[in-house]
Image (cartoon, rainbow, N blue to C red):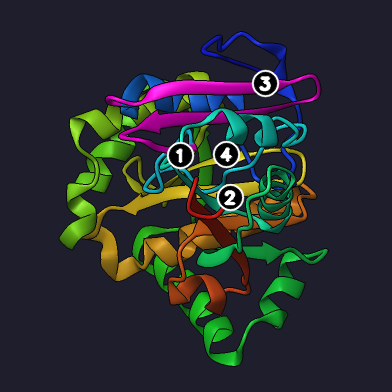
Amino acid sequence: MRIHQDWSTPALDLEPVAAQTGPFPQRAFLETWWRHRSADADLMLVESPDGLLPLMSADEVIGFVGDGDVTDYHSPLGDAAALPELVRQLPAGTMLMLNSLPTAAAEAVVAGLAAAGVNATPQQHEVAAVLTLPNTYDDWLMGLGKKTRHEVRRKGRRFETLLGPSRLERVDGPEAVAEFASMHRRAFGQKGGFMTPEMEAFFADLHAHAGAVIDVLYGTGPRPTAAAFGFEDDTTYYLYNSAYDPDMRDASPGIVLLSSLIFRAVAEHRTTVDFLKGDEPYKYQHGAHPRPLYAVEVQLGATT
């Protein structure tokens, strides 16, 4: 085992222990997060021959790189074989706070701690919302509850009446991020305060260097009505954030954006749309199911 701060290590390209975790446990996202949001933390890339734990330390607390506000999944890469040796080297009193772990990642962490003589029980603390896609968009619609299916169709027709036929367009570049951020800042309530200049810079870096994609919903005119900021791989579209123009709220652009993203994911033969963390009702109304996420928290010396 070695502990280092070398972002160029090939171990950061290993597959996450937990599948379908998007960009979040991997090099590009983690390094981007580190540039923008690491504050006073110390980087700890804990590497074994076949695995890596991307950790950080702050105030005698060790956790995975990436704060919960913007990082939806954590997972060891390759394996968690370095964890027992790491635990044995850490001083008593050190707190391990390892969260946002899908089941496979939580099991690997618990097994690694057990190998060092530390008993830990994972506690569910969050859920992600994951939609398994059928073969066709119509099949997805028919799988919804009657009320939601009617709402999707009705709001699609209303959008077309007010703004013309909808189209979803992939956009790119700094101007696209700026447009998305501007729309986001116009949201009502707490959401409108999320997109600070610092957060916009983080999103811009994710778009430029970590594979984030931006999709904009239009009517017949040139003005965007809603936008989604996400990630995608061969099987899954990950909806990271979204916004709509509040001046066009009567046309329900948020619902039309969501159904348009699902339509395209089906057309591109993806199997999943991941709405990521959060238990907002709309996710489950549109067919998602909860994916439990676990936290493993232990204070060394207290349980060894």
Disc on the earlier residue, 3 or 2:
3
Q: Residue 187, can we see it?
A: no
**Which residue shows up at 61% across the image and 56% down it?**
274
Q: Mark 3 sits on what residue?
A: 47
- 52 inside magenta stretch: yes
Residue type pointed to by label 2: Thr
Disc 2 + disc 4, Cβ < 8 Å? no
Q: Which residue is mark 4?
A: 231
Disc 4 versus disc 1: nearer the observer: 1
**Residue stretch rendered in magenta on the structure:** 39-63
Mark 1–mark 2 distance (CA, rounded to whole Å)? 9 Å
> Where 153 sits versus 90, above or below?
below
Task: Residue under label 2, please give it.
Answer: 304
Percent of width and height locating residue 28: 56, 22
**Foreground residue among 194 and 222:** 194
Name the element at disc 1: loop
Mark 3 or 1, closer to the camera: 1
Q: What kind of element bears circle 4?
A: strand
In the image, is 179 to the left or to the right of 55? left
Q: CA distance from mark 3 to mark 1?
A: 22 Å
- The quarter of the picture where the N terminus appears is top right
Distance of label 3 from label 2 (alpha carbons):
23 Å
The amino acid beneath tag 4 is Phe
* Image spot of residue 158 (x, y percent): 41, 73
From the viewer's side, name the closer residue of 209 and 8.
8
Residue 37, image x, y percentages: 32, 29
**Which residue is denoted by mark 1 in the rendering?**
92
**Could you classify mark 2 by the number of other residues whose Cα lies within 10 Å: few (under 14), some (14-19), or many (20 or more)?**
some
